[in-house]
Image (spheres, grey):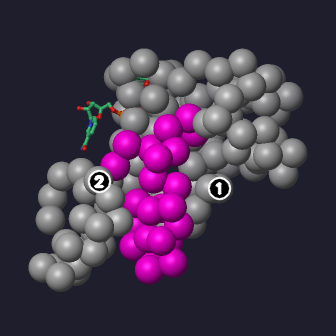
Amino acid sequence: MSGPVGSAAQVAEGREIAAIACVQNHYNLVHRADDALVDALAAAGTAYVPFFPLGGFSPIQSQGLSEVARRLDATPMQVALAWLPARAPNILLIPGTSSRAHLRENLAAASLDLPEAATRVLDGLAGA
Ligand SMILES: NC(=O)c1ccc[n+]([C@@H]2O[C@H](COP(=O)([O-])OP(=O)(O)OC[C@H]3O[C@@H](n4cnc5c(N)ncnc54)[C@H](OP(=O)(O)O)[C@@H]3O)[C@@H](O)[C@H]2O)c1
């Protein structure tokens, strides 16, 4: 199956047709409609690739995110990226950029460890 898969029911339907190695859908720090699906896929050992990991064409803007980033001496986009693989072990990241500076910044996010207190603040941003 190719293209976005929108729900757990669609994943189940797809599994009757073929083995599913990976699901791709819209998901990021502030767009969390797939929370339960991410967890179910993690339990099944299926990868999840969030598209728009930084918010897509309008990158995420959030005061809470900026404050966490300032405390960690990182950029908001680095924190938004670091949150995703910390959220679930099956999340694979493909952030898009047309800028080498952003590419370097985004690659550096791979070594950013989020302390528990920061994760708690970030986890609450979707409902803020
Ligand atoms: N396969 C699919 O199902 C699917 C679905 C949706 C979209 N897409 C494709 O994915 C692309 C965009 O989606 P995406 O997933 O790449 O979105 P994304 O990673 O959430 O966001 C990309 C945007 O963030 C900006 N950005 C990247 N790194 C940044 C940084 N460090 N600081 C500030 N801004 C930064 C980029 O601008 P700069 O270029 O200036 O860095 C770009 O505007 C599009 O080409 C779209 O066609 C594919």
Residue at 45% from the left image edge and 78% from the top image edge? 45
Question: In the rendered view, would you say 128 is above or below 23?
Answer: above
Residue type at numbered disc 1: Ala
Instruction: Please report whichever mark, 2 or 1, sits nearer to the chain's N-terminal start.
Output: 2
- The image quadrant where one finds the C terminus is top right
Question: In the rendered view, would you say 14 is above or below 54?
Answer: below
Bounds of the magenta segment? 25-48
Which residue corresponds to mark 1?
86
Few, some or many residues within 10 Å of mark 1 (<14, 14–19, 20+): few
Q: Nearer the viewer, residue 14 or 2?
A: 14
On screen, residue 89 versus residue 7, left or right, reads right
On screen, residue 69 versus residue 40, left or right, reads right
Residue at 87% from the left image edge and 45% from the top image edge? 117
Question: In the rendered view, would you say 117 is above or below 52?
Answer: below
> Label 2 to label 1, Cα distance in Å?
22 Å
Which residue corresponds to mark 2?
6
Within the magenta stretch, is there residue 32? yes
